[in-house]
Image: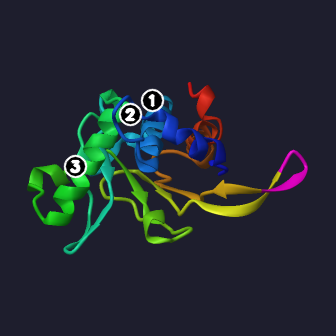
Amino acid sequence: VDVTDLWNLRPQMATEGQRAPSFTAILARYVLLALADFPLLAGRIEGEEIVQFDAVNLGIAADTDRGLLVPVIPRAHEHSLSAIDDALRALAVEARSGGLAPERLSGSTFTLNNYGAFGVDGSAAIINHPEVAILGVGQVRERAWVVGGELAVRRIAQLSLVFDHRVCDGGYAAGFLRRVVEALESPLTVY
């Protein structure tokens, strides 16, 4: 996905007196908007049943000294971009310090994994059971890209959606991913 326009606009997304939101926070917000239209991906499999929820509890994969943890932002779909950014920063500090309470590590309904922070372009993310899907994002890198028939240097990131085929088919999952890509590529037209 070409995130050049978003990358250039991000500094302008800061509220007065505040820092610009992180790329992960922006991606999380776009994911939450897309999940509103593709809610099956924010469900869980419990036993033999597919369970849907009235909220998206967003899990965020975090690398810590104790290994990979997935702290949760409850009812994340109700948060503003600024609130998501604040929550992500606070969760990262808590996770890395070992101060996360066990209840902060359960109840997620969809997980976002930004492995790009480690300089990785792509990966096959593993679904955080009992969830049905996870979205991974690789490092944003400058790459040669064709734009309007011309070769240009653009900021590109690789997205990787992994989903449980018992819950939905590839068309449904691709629709979700397309919605996220559209938002990332055209941030001024976000629905």
Q: Amino acid at mark 1?
A: Ala
Question: Residue at the location (49% across, 71% down)?
Answer: 119
Q: Residue furthest front?
A: 17
Judging from the image, what secondary structure is the residue with disc 3 in?
helix
Start-end of magenta stretch: 147-152
Q: CA distance from mark 3 to mark 1?
A: 25 Å
Residue 173 seen by the camera: yes
Question: Compared with residue 152, is residue 39 higher up or lower down, i.e. above or below?
Answer: above
- Label 1: state its secondary structure: helix
Give how far across and how far down residue 116 sits, in percent: 48, 64
* Residue shown at the point (32%, 53%) measured from the top left: 60
Residue 188 lies, with reference to residue 154, above or below; the image says above
Q: Are marks 1 and 2 in contact (CB under 8 Å)?
A: no
Q: Quadrant of residue 62?
A: bottom left
Looking at the image, tell me whether mark 3 or mark 2 is earlier in sequence order: 2
Residue at horizontal 57%, vertical 59%? 140
Q: Main secondary structure of the magenta part?
A: strand
Quadrant housing residue 115: bottom left
- Residue 132 vs 29, above or below: the answer is below
Quarter occupied by the C terminus: top right
Q: Earlier in the sequence, mark 3 or mark 1?
A: 1
> Which one is nearer the viewer's eye here, 131 or 88?
88
Element marked by disc 2:
helix
Asked if residue 155 lies left or right of residue 99, the reply is: right
Which residue is identified by label 1?
A: 36
Q: Which mark is residue 90?
A: 3
Residue at mark 2: 81
Which of discs 3 and 1 lies nearer the camera? The answer is: 3
**In the drawing, does residue 143 fall left or right of residue 75?**
right
User: Crowding near pointer 1: few (<14 within 10 Å), some, many (20+)?
Assistant: some
Q: Callout 2 environment at 10 Å: few (<14), some (14 to 19), or many (20+)?
A: many
Report if residue 140 lies within the magenta region. Answer: no
